């Protein structure tokens, strides 16, 4: 067996070992979360509460207007953007 074949065989074994190690780590870390040994940073209710405060208010209306051939008028989507809404909670750099 020449040098290239040996290197290829070693690389194959390393890749198989890395794949098995990654699968074992995913199963182990998932089991820790399921068993309650570690807790995720945010619970689902906390994430929903944060999303509701960040996305409070009515969504902007989107109107799809087909362009007519030969007209110079732009569709309503090219109007000036509305003024930005302010979040009810003051956000800082730590929130990013």
Image: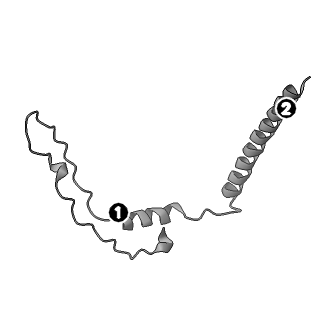
Q: Position of residue 26 (x, y in %)?
A: 70, 48
Extreme top residue here?
1
Residue at image mark 1 = 55
Q: Position of residue 56 (x, y in %)?
A: 32, 65
- Which comes before the other along the chain, label 2 or label 1? 2
Other residues around mark 1 within 10 Å, as few (<14) / some (14–19) / many (≥20) = few
Other residues around mark 2 within 10 Å, as few (<14) / some (14–19) / many (≥20) = few
Measured in 3D between alpha carbons, the distance from the residue under mark 2 to the one under mark 1, in whole angstroms, is: 55 Å
Figure quadrant of residue 7: top right
Of 76 and 58, nearer the camera is 76
Q: What's the residue at 68%, 52% (across, down)?
A: 30
Position of 40 with respect to 65 (left or right) is right
Residue at image mark 2 = 7
Q: Position of residue 66 (x, y in %)?
A: 16, 37
Figure quadrant of residue 64: top left
Q: Is residue 57 above or below residue 23?
A: below
Of 36 and 18, nearer the camera is 18
Q: What's the residue at 71%, 62% (across, down)?
A: 37
């Amino acid at each position: 067996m020449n040098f290239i074949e040996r290197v290829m065989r070693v690389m194959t074994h390393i890749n198989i070992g890395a794949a098995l190690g990654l699968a074992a780590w995913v199963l182990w870390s998932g089991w820790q979360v399921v068993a309650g040994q570690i807790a995720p940073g945010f619970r689902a209710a906390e994430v929903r509460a944060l999303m509701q405060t960040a996305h409070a208010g009515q969504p902007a209306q989107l109107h799809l207007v087909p362009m007519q051939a030969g007209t110079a008028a732009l569709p309503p989507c090219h109007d000036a953007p509305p003024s930005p809404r302010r979040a009810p909670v003051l956000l800082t750099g730590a929130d990013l």
